[in-house]
Image (cartoon, rainbow, N blue to C red):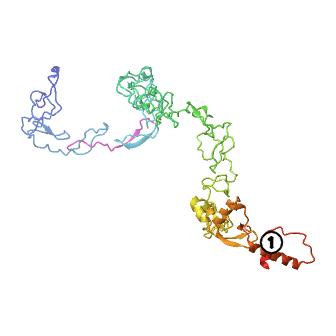
Amino acid sequence: MCRCGRVEEERECCERDFRCENACGKALDCGKHVCERGCHVGQCGGCPLQGKRTCPCGKRVYEGMSCDVAVPLCGATCDKMLSCRIHRCHDRCHRGPCIETCRMVIAKLCRCRSLKKEVPCYQDLVCERKCQRMRDCGRHACKRRCCNGDCPPCSEICGKRLLCKNHKCPSPCHRGACAPCPLMVTISCACGETQFEVPCGTEKDQKPPKCRKSCHVIPLCRHRSICKPHKCHYGACPPCRLLCEEEYPCGHSCKLSCHGPRPPPNPEFTLKTKKKKSNHQSEVTPGSPCPPCPELIWRSCVGEHIGAERMMVCSDRTQFSCDNLCGNPLPCGNHYCTKYCHALKSQSSLSVETRSAESCEVCSLPCQKERLPTCPHSCPLPCHPGECPPCKVLVKRSCHCGSMVHVFECIYFNTLSEKEQMAARSCGGPCHRKLPYCTHLCPEICHPGQCPLPEQCCKKVTVRCGCQTLKKEWQCLDVQAAYRNIGRDPKDISKNQFGLGLLRCNSDCKSKVQVVDSVLQSRKPKVEVTCFLSNKKQLIEAAHVY
């Protein structure tokens, strides 16, 4: 408890007696006022307004007045010393303090004693002259206006670079060396989980703490899911030690160590002192592209000839020609290119160094295909792919009997079967061919091949005797049989002699011959017949005339 007993606090045992900051506030003996003394022990004493009391200026004394009655003013001059300690108050006796500003005009010197002037007593005289004396720091001038020579301590901040080289002295300007840097620097691992503090300026000699946490930086290469984790560290992460194995467009894979992009180091955890704050952020280190595929493969020549392959590096797309002929089918589809191996226009090139494509030679031969159906006419087109057009050449075919000629398109006639061809060639009339064993014509409709049953001819034949006097009509087949009976082939008998001599002459024949002889002699009596008729037929015809 405090002395007045109004405040209770917990304090050390040696501080049992303490005073609070409140006024006592206890009622005085007069019962009209309270004690205005600070916290105290014991009795408060009597009321200070009891007993003798004076007027405010102190010149007149009053006795026996009650403490609650105000002391009357005496009406005399106050005459109290003013705050300037030079002049007195000229007002009449008054309650309260005297006027604070003495208005008496006096001659004053300024503080630096360079200016003298009459001014009111309460007013200080200050000139405009600035003090040029050096302050106690020895670095800055006083520059206070109208200084009396007692220059105040320097109020500037020292600002000298401390020995730590990181901060400036925060103390007021002073002489001599600055105190050591009071700040502490936290040295932490890259992730910030492990850290310790050292005095500023000694962090350059410290090593970063060893952190057992795993590095939080995620790898950027293609092995991020299978990379082994590593411990927390400063700077760049260690390079990935796995094989790249990125697949080339050709299908092979890269056999080099991983060379993909690497994440940037965190700049906040570097141990170097930062002379100047920079907004530059570390960037991702781009990975290098895979080198060209080094695998050895067999590659064909530009003409893709079998057996002309060469062993080449897969990434080397240089094309080469072999010594073989091209052999590529020409557009005609029937012949092959006879140029030496060359790149084709339709061939898609995979090499960077591509030769100019060369077209195969143009086939200038006439069409040499065998037409289907087979015909003796050649195709009028130049050498071409596919089948030849139908043959439109007009062919002449005589009928079987030879009496007329048919004209057909070759394609039409050749597409007919043999039976249909025979039917198409028939003229539809009688055969008109001579039978082989007689002088008659075939009576059948125009037909192919040999006439049917030529030995069975039933035509009527006039048969005569040797002098042609006698005659009869036989069937042709009987005439043929008669000739065979006498040892003659019917085929050897001419048409004029066919059937002549098959009958024997009689008496009528002799008389007729005699008549003929007499007629001849009468016509030529003076001319000697020197030539005889060599042909019996002529004699017979002369006899018939006469």
Q: Pinpoint residue 197: horizontal percent, then vertical percent.
A: 36, 23
Q: How many numbered callouts?
A: 1
521 relative position to 351: left or right: right
Amino acid tagged 1: Gln
Q: Residue furthest front?
A: 507
Q: How far across and down, in percent of the image, does residue 424 sit? A: 60, 65
Residue 491 figure quarter: bottom right
The residue at the point 72 percent across, 61 percent down is 492
The residue located at (57%, 60%) in the rendering is: 419
Q: Where is residue 126, by image quadrant? A: top left
**Quadrant assignment for the N terminus:** top left
**Residue, disc 1:** 538
Q: Position of residue 501 (x, y in %)?
A: 73, 67
Q: Look at the image and tell me in which quarter the C terminus lies.
A: bottom right
The chief SS type of the magenta part is: loop
Q: Is residue 345 visible?
A: yes
Range of the magenta residues?
Answer: 94-113
Give above or below for 433 relative to 118: below
Quadrant of residue 488 in the image?
Answer: bottom right
Residue 106 is covered by the magenta coloring = yes
Seen from the viewer's position, the closer of residues 430 and 36 is 430
Residue 3 position within the rendered picture, expressed as x and y whole percent measured from the top left: 12, 27
Image: 62 above or below 192: below
Observer able to see residue 183: no
